[in-house]
Amino acid sequence: MKSKTWVDTPEKPRFTPPPGAVDAHVHVFGPEARFRFAPQAKYHPEDATPEMLFALRDRLGFARNVIVQASCHGTDNAATLDAIARSDGRARGVAAVDPTISDAELHALHAGGIRAVRFNFLKRLVDDAPKDRFLDIAGRIAPLGWHVVVYFEADILEELTPFLGAIPTTIVVDHLGRPDIAQGPGGTDLRALRGLLDAHPNIWTKVSGAERLSPQGPPFDDFVAAVAPIVAAYPDRVLWGTDWPHPNMEHRIPEDGTLVDLLPRLAPTGELQHKLLVANPMRLYWPEA
Ligand code: 0GY
């Protein structure tokens, strides 16, 4: 059965994002009739099309999106590129690439709006994560001005640290490296993440994923308590995204408006909100603007 993991017309948020705000972590699925899912895909979702994404963007009050290639499309970035091409310049993307990709193909991705590659270490999403080949890719995308997005869970942070230290570009850690939020702001996992950020000024993180990480659920008080200190401590190295259409969340489908309403709690001042939602994502994805 195909999974459906989003609310079609979510409540409008009470919070109004600042002008030019970027929802910096979203995906598109298909449409499958044009863009098949990868044979090795670990989930098989319903279509979540560019038109649906752009309607959500407008409803939530965002100006731009960063579309992250979803693992169900493997390393064929055609659906992501199609969505970027339909966005009137209001989307850029993060690709998943095969280590054998040619320089010409990398340049074509750049022309199509890709500005980063994602290395996914979640065993439930990908079959293998070859660090040596990822490092090779990182070296090849650096001259394009791209960065690396990494997705991993907290239990492998220590093991991954030498690998992360060898990446020559900016690195963005998805969903805070999936810490155990129940440990609180001073817990082992968030302390380890802060240690990583302190040791490596080129490492950023997405303060997203409340719906995935919060044992309490809405209104996500546990997530806010644990994560607002990260925004305050690293205001120039944080990004945020809804994660629509919320892959694999069929049992806890979030309301996107509720997620947006976390923003003034995670970033309580106008200055922090502008950095998190405008200045920081623009620096990485639209540096020419
Ligand atoms: C996310 C999280 C997940 C899925 C993917 O590429 C993906 O399929 O990233 C997940 O299942 O935790 O960031 O969308």
Image: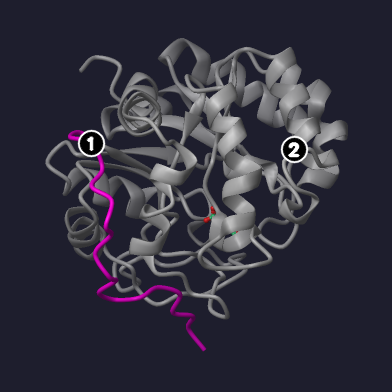
Residue 230 pos. (x, y %):
60, 32
Q: Residues within 10 Å of mark 2 (few under 14, many from 20)?
A: many
Q: Within 8 Å of ligand 1, the CB of disc 2?
A: no
The answer to whether 281 is drawn above or below residue 254 in the figure is: above
Q: Within 8 Å of ligand 1, the CB of disc 1?
A: no
Q: Which dot marks residue 18? A: 1
* Residue, disc 2: 190
> Which residue is at 27% across, 57% downward?
14
Residue 213 pos. (x, y %):
65, 58
Q: Name the element at disc 1.
A: loop
Residue flagged by tag 2: what amino acid is it?
Leu
The colour scheme applied to this rendered structure is: one colour
For the residue pair 135 and 45, the one nearer the viewer reads as 45
Q: Which residues are magenta?
A: 1-20
Split into quadrants, the picture shows ligand 1 in the one at bottom right
Q: Name the element at disc 2.
A: helix
Q: Which of the 4 quarters of the picture holds residue 134?
A: top right
Magenta-span inclusion, residue 284: no
Residue 29 can be seen in this image = no
> Which residue is at 27% across, 65% downward?
49
Residue 250 pos. (x, y %):
53, 78
The answer to whether 23 is drawn above or below residue 34 in the figure is: above
Residue 248 can be seen in this image = yes
Q: Main secondary structure of the magenta part?
A: loop
Magenta-span inclusion, residue 15: yes
The tag earlier along the polypeptide, 1 or 2, is 1
> Which residue is at 75% across, 38% downward?
190
Q: Left or right? Give the position of 141 relative to 186.
A: left
Q: Which of the 4 quarters of the picture holds residue 189?
A: top right
